[in-house]
Amino acid sequence: TFQPRVFSGIQPSGGLTLGNYLGAIRRFVDTQNANRDSGIETIYCMVDQHAITVWQDPAALTRNTRELAAGYIAAGLDPAKSILFNQSQVAEHAQLAWIFNCVARMGWMQRMTQWKDKAGKNSQNASLGLFAYPALMAADILIYHATHVPVGEDQKQHVELTRDIAAKFNHDFGVDFFPLTEPVIEGAATRVMSLRDGSKKMSKSDPSDASRINMTDDADTIAQKFRKAKTDPDALPSEAAGLEGRPEARNLVNIYAALNDQSVDEVLRDVGGRQFSEFKPMLSDLAVAKLSPISGEMARLMQAPDEIDAILRSGADRARVMAAPILKRTYEIVGM
Ligand code: ADP
Ligand code: NA
């Protein structure tokens, strides 16, 4: 009985990476364009309240929020087709998150692998917000009754928690008010790995810049990072099974496949038998060809921050119109 509706978000906690692009933004654009004439709303947020669960320099947060918006627009998100806005400008997210803080259980949060990874051994010194992060994410999604969330694999567990929160709320209050949202995890690059360590995901918050391709890296930097990317001494296999136990090799082939809209097997049919010394420049050229139009447009947009701010303001106005009645009804259900 819930209308299909799409929501997703990215933290403005640093520059965008190739992982964000392939795992998230590119798929936001595909989803927007596939649903263009269907009346299905696509809602994409910059989640600044998530970013501040770890320290953010205020001026950098402002700049990164604009740069993320520029990345969304440059990659093809269109404010006429999708709602683009900044989370903190729509207070209903935080208001619903409080209700969900009271629905979610401590044990559920403690099981989240992102919490365990990010808080590390020093969890007593992590912010309370970092612990509560998944309840805010559930609120981001459910304040719009979103049914589908395109994300990378690392967010699957959080979307499952969102379903648990919705189900517990519905059960506790005897309603069928919140949908059980589905994660949508698709494509050859749902988990892009670090270029320096095949066991870690590529992330904008990794201290090593060499571990990632940034959307704003120039052609020389991209070529240099791929040239130095960790690999093994063997040639490329001619089918996907040959990548078993070779995480770094698999990662580079996955990136190539995703950038070139091919399957891994199709890529390996062409490049099987080659050495990485030959494949890496092919990968760099492809990445530069795909990313440079986007980074060029991002740079142009960053010259017009007022334009970006105006787009985000009008997006927030539209988002608020959708969020307000859902928060109001939630309060009524709770008895507030
Ligand atoms: P980051 O870890 O770079 O700070 P976020 O937590 O803001 O990224 O995630 C934003 C979106 O990008 C999410 O949908 C997430 O699943 C996706 N994403 C992040 N890193 C990767 C990656 N290495 N590979 C694929 N998708 C990713
Ligand atoms: Na993340």
Image (cartoon, rainbow, N blue to C red):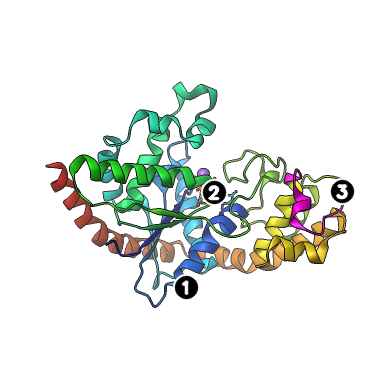
- The residue range painted magenta reads 235-247
User: Is any atom of residue 223 visible in this view?
Assistant: yes
User: Is any atom of residue 302 visible in this view?
Assistant: no
Identify the residue at the far bottom of this view.
37
Residue that numbered label 2 is attached to: 153
In three-dimensional space, the C-alpha distance between marks 1 and 3, rounded to whole angstroms, equals 40 Å
Q: Residue at x 27, y 39 (%)?
A: 98
Viewer-closest of 216 and 59: 216
Q: Which mark is residue 234?
A: 3
Where, by quadrant of the figure, is residue 275 drawn? Answer: bottom right
Which label's residue is closer to the chain start, 1 or 3?
1
Which label's residue is closer to the chain start, 1 or 2?
1
Ligand 1 near label 2 (Cβ, under 8 Å)? yes
Q: Which mark is residue 90?
A: none
The type of residue carrying mark 3 is Asp
x, y percent for residue 208: 67, 40
The type of residue carrying mark 2 is Glu
Which label's residue is closer to the chain start, 3 or 2?
2
Residue that numbered label 1 is attached to: 33
Q: Residue at x 79, y 52 (%)?
A: 242
